[in-house]
Every structure is written in C-alpha cells, then in structure tokens.
Image (cartoon, helix red, strand yellow):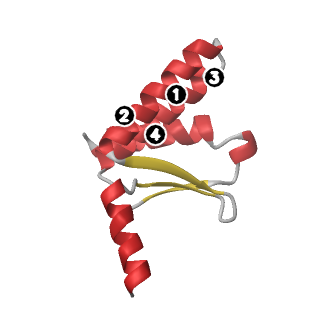
Amino acid sequence: MRVEDFEKIIEMWRGHILVEALEGYDIEIQDDVPDHFAAIALYLDSLTVRAAGDTQEFYEGYKKAATDILNLIGVEIFEDTETKLILIRRKAIEEDKQEILKKYIWE
C-alpha cells in the first residue's frame, strides 16, 4: 500500500467518524500494527458506520463481517473516553492472555 493511499484512508475516516460525539478525538496506531492492517480497520469502521443509516439487517451484516475480519488479522479499535483517543491496537489472543495471567500470578 502506498503511503498516499494510507493517508487518504485516515483522512476519510477522520472526516466521517470524528464528528459530533467524537469531535475532538484523535487517532493513534500502535507501532506493532502494520499500516495495511490499520487501513483495513479504519476502512471497515467507516463502512460499518455508513451502513448504520441503512436497514438494520444491512448494518448488522457489515458489523459482523468487519468484526470477523478484524479478529482474523488480530486488530481492534479501542475508544478511550478519558484521553479522547481512538486506538488501533493488536488484539490479545487467548495465548497472550494466558501468559499475562501467568506473569501476574507468579511474579
């Protein structure tokens, strides 16, 4: 993916998502998330929100497909209301959660 395309997707997402209730928020993409995965997450987020204006079945279909794809690539979109930040981060898989729990219990 070209840098220009990635930047266009981010700007499209900002213009579509960071309005009204999310005005004043910013976006942060963690370093361990590849740009093309972040672009997919932002694009799907934008499509899902646009689909919300259509019929409920249409919206639910988009939402399910977007969630399935993000789960597949191991990325999640997290909203931090305190810092007004939308964070694109790697999703902890079950094995990661087990390792974190082991460290917490045994250290």
| First along the sequence among labels 3 and 4 | 4
Residue at horizontal 39%, vertical 39%?
70
Say which amino acid is labelled 2: Ile
The residue labelled by disc 3 is 52
Residue 94 seen by the camera: yes
Say which amino acid is labelled 3: Ala
In which image quadrant can residue 15 be found? Answer: top right
Which one is closest to the eye, mark 2 or mark 3?
2
Residue at horizontal 61%, vertical 38%?
17
The residue labelled by disc 1 is 63
SS at badge 4? helix
The residue labelled by disc 2 is 69
Say which amino acid is labelled 4: Leu
Q: Is residue 57 above or below residue 38?
A: above
SS at badge 1? helix
The residue labelled by disc 4 is 42
